Amino acid sequence: MLRIIAVVLFAFSFSSLNAQDRELKFYQDKIYESFITDNIKIWEGAVGLMEASYRNNPREELLYNIVLANYGLIGYHLGFDNSKQGRYYLDRAYPFLEELFKNPKYEAEAWAFQAAFYGYEMSLNRLKGVTLGTRSYAAADKAVAANPKYARAWVEKGNLSFYTPSIFGGSKKEAAEHYAKAIKIYEVNMPYSHRWLYLNTLISLAKSYEYTSRVQDAIIVMDKVLKFEPNFKWAKEDYLPNLEKKN
């Protein structure tokens, strides 16, 4: 009888685990769909659902994906100079990042997010640039030191090099090197939730090449983007055609 109960409990646990995996995949697919179709409302809806699910049933992998989703959402809004929405999602994300920092398993991930969040704060208030710039570089270095095979750590180092003015040590060429390193890592081992990040990093690499007069190399990278995802609307209809005009 005890053995039967144990088997039933194991089966229930396995079924529950599969349900959680399916739920997480659903959110990840929605975010990817949002990214390639340029429909941010889908992304925002997925973030809301994820946060509600976490409050009902906290679990570490969902927590990581919540911070990751907010990270992308904040970047999107700030990229379109929508500081109000950027501020809103950044403030929502901080408590989840604090929780992530409590888990040693996610040390590199948390530091990489922290580096990005400092960058977002600088975007929202340029006067904080001197103080937060140093902190952002330090956080990115801590992410790399904690796990050099975590691609996003190199992405953040690339972002810092790309967006920091050259007078303060920024370099588009150095940014390209960091992005290329992240891409190599992704192409060996890419988490399912990072598919949109892989595409975004390829775009960042292409932009680094564009800004350093390597337009043909940028086009080659964008061809790679569309080979990975032929339905990527912005890449196919906007950025690649503009690059080809420059070539």
Image: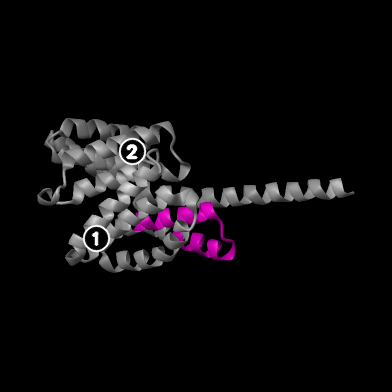
**Residue 98 sits in which quadrant?**
bottom left
Q: Is residue 150 magenta?
A: no
Question: In the orientation shown, which residue stands out farthest toward the left?
Answer: 167
Q: Residue at x 36, y 57 (%)?
A: 73
Q: Could you tell me residue 190's position as x and y percent?
A: 43, 37
- Element at badge 2? helix
Query: Which comes before the other along the chain, label 1 or label 2?
Result: 1
Amino acid type at circle 2 is Ala
| Residue closest to the eye, 177 or 222 | 177
Q: Is residue 73 above or below residue 92?
A: above
Residue at image mark 1:
132
Report the Cα–Cα distance between label 1 and label 2. Answer: 23 Å
The residue wearing badge 2 is 182
Question: The disc labelled 1 sits on which kind of residue?
Answer: Leu
The answer to whether 104 appears left or right of 203 in the picture is right
Residue drawn where x is 28% and y is 32% of the image: 223
- Residue 12 position within the rendered picture, expressed as x and y whole percent measured from the top left: 73, 50
**Magenta residues, start to end:** 47-73
Q: Residue at x 22, y 41 (%)?
A: 175
Q: Quadrant of residue 121?
A: bottom left
The answer to whether 183 appears left or right of 173 in the picture is right
Compared with 137, 208 (above or below) is above
Location of residue 34 in the rendering, given as x and y in whole percent from the top left corner: 39, 51
Figure check: 102 above or below 87: above
Q: Residue at x 36, y 56 (%)?
A: 71
Residue 63: give its label.
none
- Tally of numbered tags: 2
